[in-house]
Amino acid sequence: MGRYILRRLLQLIPVFIGTTFIIYSLVWAIPGNPFAGLCGPRGCPPAFIDQMTEQYNLDQPLPVQYVLYLGQLFQGNFGETFNGIEVGTLIQQAYPVTLKLATIALIFEAIIGIAAGILTALRGKGFVDNLVLAATLFLIAVPVFVSGFVIQVVFGVQLEWMEPSVGADPGIGQLIVPGLVLGSLSMAYIARLTRTAMFENKRADYIRTATAKGLTPRRVVSVHMLRNSLIPVITFIGTDFGALMGGAIVTEGVFNIHGIGGLVFSAIQGQEGITVTGVVTLLVLVYLLMNLLVDILYAALDPRIRYD
């Protein structure tokens, strides 16, 4: 198991360098001088532009810029915005909000999605199965910003059952509805994935053997069938956490949540390349670590994987 984890860790290094280099190149390859609009319509003095260009190493070749940026990053320095604010401070303020939102979304999609998948697989084809399939198809077809807007208007504005927008420092209670909206799409995929895996394993030889040995139906389902059926579901949930962290930008915009999504959105509008690079690099790191965790769980559930 130790060699398996070490091999997976070594695989993350080239992936991290490759993805962050592509991100850095794309962000700083935007046409136009990023400092030209900082002084209003009259433009900035050439001396100021030269100073900022040197400060952000933009006068160096792109590979040299990236290596210098990576060196600062390994020291925990995400750089400064054009206004002199530490990017690390902005991330520190915004990240906990998005982390809470993504965690709530992940809990909703895991509990409801897996329960719906198990229920439909055990009951077989019928009314419940058709109802779940129709509901999941509806969630997949409707974009998140549409469902979020409808819920906000109906339950927030008309019925007044919730606050239409979230405050600056939201608690868990204020993030439940946005978390449900954020996790709705993945919830539908998890329900369908669990249902398909359960159906396949119901016909497997080892399930017939376990039943023939006289095990109770509850033990056959909970110990044998569910364990193997959840392997692809755990893989999806693990990788989805990274996607939720990055994809929260739409949900945060609808419910006025001041998280990572709002920070990236305002940074793109202001052409703050250093902020965009720092946030996206952090998201890449989260995504890679979640994939590593999934690989370890995958190997723990199915020992054959670690010997491949």
Image (spheres, rainbow, N blue to C red):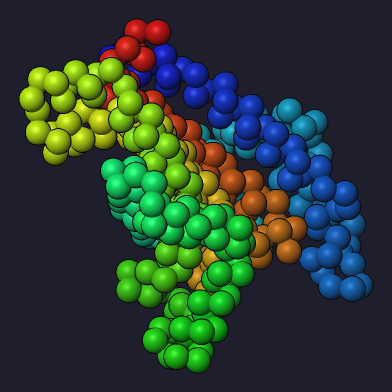
Judge by depth and name the residue closer to the eye, 86 or 107: 107
**Quadrant of the image occupied by residue 307:** top left
Name the residue rendered at 56%, 69% in the picture: 147
In percent of width and height, residue 53 lies at 79, 48
Q: Is residue 86 visible?
A: no
Name the residue rendered at 69%, 39% in the picture: 24
Direction top: furthest residue: 307
Judge by depth and name the residue closer to the eye, 22 or 249: 249
In percent of width and height, residue 162 lies at 41, 83
In the image, 165: left or right of 253? Answer: left
Direction front: furthest residue: 126
In the image, 117: left or right of 69? Answer: left
In percent of width and height, residue 47 lies at 86, 56
Name the residue rendered at 67%, 32% in the picture: 21
In the image, 168: left or right of 225? Answer: right
Q: Is residue 121 visible?
A: yes
The quadrant of the image that shows the C terminus is: top left
Figure check: 90 above or below 67: below
| Number of numbered discs on residues | 0
Judge by depth and name the residue closer to the eye, 131 or 269: 131
The quadrant of the image that shows the N terminus is: top left
In the image, 308: left or right of 73? Answer: left
**Quadrant of the image occupied by residue 83:** bottom right
Name the residue rendered at 57%, 25% in the picture: 15
Figure check: 251 above or below 52: below
Figure check: 297 above or below 178: above
Figure check: 252 above or below 78: below
In percent of width and height, residue 262 lies at 58, 65
